[in-house]
């Protein structure tokens, strides 16, 4: 008996397990500021379409069922997990009344300097470190808008030597009545070029060659934070559906295993 069917069922179970992991991560971050939900992406892999014409098997016995599958090249059909995609849909804004909390309304990402290079975030929950620099909760410096495309990130740290910090809708920073510069809010034209780097930060994928550009048309809100864009009702519904599909694939695996056992152990007796 062919094992092709059980391979298909196992691949489906693996796919749903990955989907459940993704949904669980979304639910765990429902209260994380500016978290962007992920969704697992799948496709059906059919060797009839993937194989080159010169490698498709030629049937030895044209009348047999096995030869029919060989003739079509469809000897394998299974779920192929393509990875995850991130939704950058705007989250709702909540008031915190903290002067170092900032929320972006519209497209845009804050630039921060990390040990792994410049990364990007929409989580504007910032603080001041011992050197009076504006930093993230992890201590990474938040950056000013670059004067030139090649300006070094280390020269763009924001020092807030004062008590009264005001930031306008365009990102202009004023400390005790004196202008300091503009918070760097950038736009990445192709969001698929971003990968999650942890703690609501994103990094550019290595294959991405286009540099981010200053964002346009956004509004910056001081004393606000952006909520995650996770809809808990949708996630729970998706989790129930994925669990049911996973259970169905388990039953299919058990059925195939039972049929194979009968073919191996019972048929030879007749």
Image (cartoon, grey):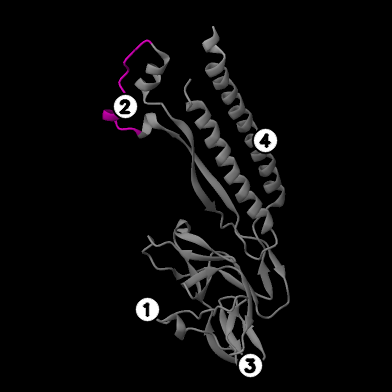
For mark 3, what is the residue? 162
Q: Which mark is residue 244?
A: 4
Looking at the rendered structure, the secondary structure element under dot 1 is loop
- Assess whether mark 2 and mark 1 are in contact (beta carbons under 8 angstroms): no
Which comes sooner in the sequence, label 3 or label 4?
A: 3
Q: Dividing the picture into quarters, in which one does residue 126 lie?
A: bottom right
Mark 2 or 3: the one toward you: 2
Say above or below: 6 vs 139: above
**Mark positioned earlier in the residue sequence (2 or 3):** 2
Indicate the position of residue 143 as horizontal and vertical percent values.
51, 79
Whole-percent x and y of residue 195? Answer: 49, 60
Of the numbered discs 3 and 1, the one sitting upstream in the chain is: 1
At 63% from the left and 54% from the top, the residue drawn is 25
Residue farthest left in this picture: 54
Give the residue pinned by disc 2.
Answer: 56
Is residue 71 magenta-colored? no
Task: Name above or below for residue 266 compared with residue 213.
Answer: above
Residue tagged by mark 1? 150
Image-based side of 174 in relation to 48, left or right: right
Residue 65, quarter of picture: top left
Residue 237 tag number: none
Q: Secondary structure at mark 3?
A: loop
Q: Is residue 151 above or below residue 194?
A: below
For the residues labelled 3 and 1, the Cα–Cα distance comes to 29 Å
Label 1: how many Cα within 10 Å (few below 14, some 14–19, many 20+): few
What residue is rendered at 39% in x and 31% in y?
A: 47
2 and 3 marks in contact (CB < 8 Å): no
């Amino acid at each position: 008996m062919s094992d092709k069917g059980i391979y298909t069922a196992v691949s489906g179970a693996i796919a749903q397990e990955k989907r459940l992991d993704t949904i669980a991560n979304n639910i765990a971050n429902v209260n994380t500021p500016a978290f962007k939900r992920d969704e697992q992406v799948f496709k059906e892999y059919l060797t009839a379409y993937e194989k080159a014409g010169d490698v498709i098997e030629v049937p030895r016995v044209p009348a047999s069922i096995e030869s029919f599958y060989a003739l079509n090249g469809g000897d394998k059909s299974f779920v192929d997990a393509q990875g995850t995609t991130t939704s950058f849909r705007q989250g709702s804004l909540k008031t915190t009344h903290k002067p170092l909390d900032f929320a972006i309304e519209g497209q845009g990402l804050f630039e921060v300097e990390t040990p792994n290079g410049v990364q990007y975030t929409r989580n504007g929950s910032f603080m001041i470190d011992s050197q009076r620099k504006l930093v993230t909760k992890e201590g990474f410096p938040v950056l000013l808008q670059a004067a030139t495309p090649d300006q070094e990130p280390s020269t763009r740290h924001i020092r807030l030597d004062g008590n009264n910090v005001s930031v306008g809708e365009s990102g202009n920073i004023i400390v005790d009545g004196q202008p300091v510069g503009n918070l760097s809010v950038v736009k990445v034209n192709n969001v698929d070029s971003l990968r999650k780097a942890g703690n609501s930060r994103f990094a550019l994928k290595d294959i991405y060659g286009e540099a981010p550009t200053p964002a346009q048309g956004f509004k910056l809100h001081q004393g606000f934070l952006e909520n995650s864009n996770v809809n808990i009702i949708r996630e729970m519904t998706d989790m129930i559906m994925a669990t049911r599909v996973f259970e169905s694939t388990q039953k299919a695996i058990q059925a195939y295993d039972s049929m194979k056992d009968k073919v191996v152990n019972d048929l030879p007796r007749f």
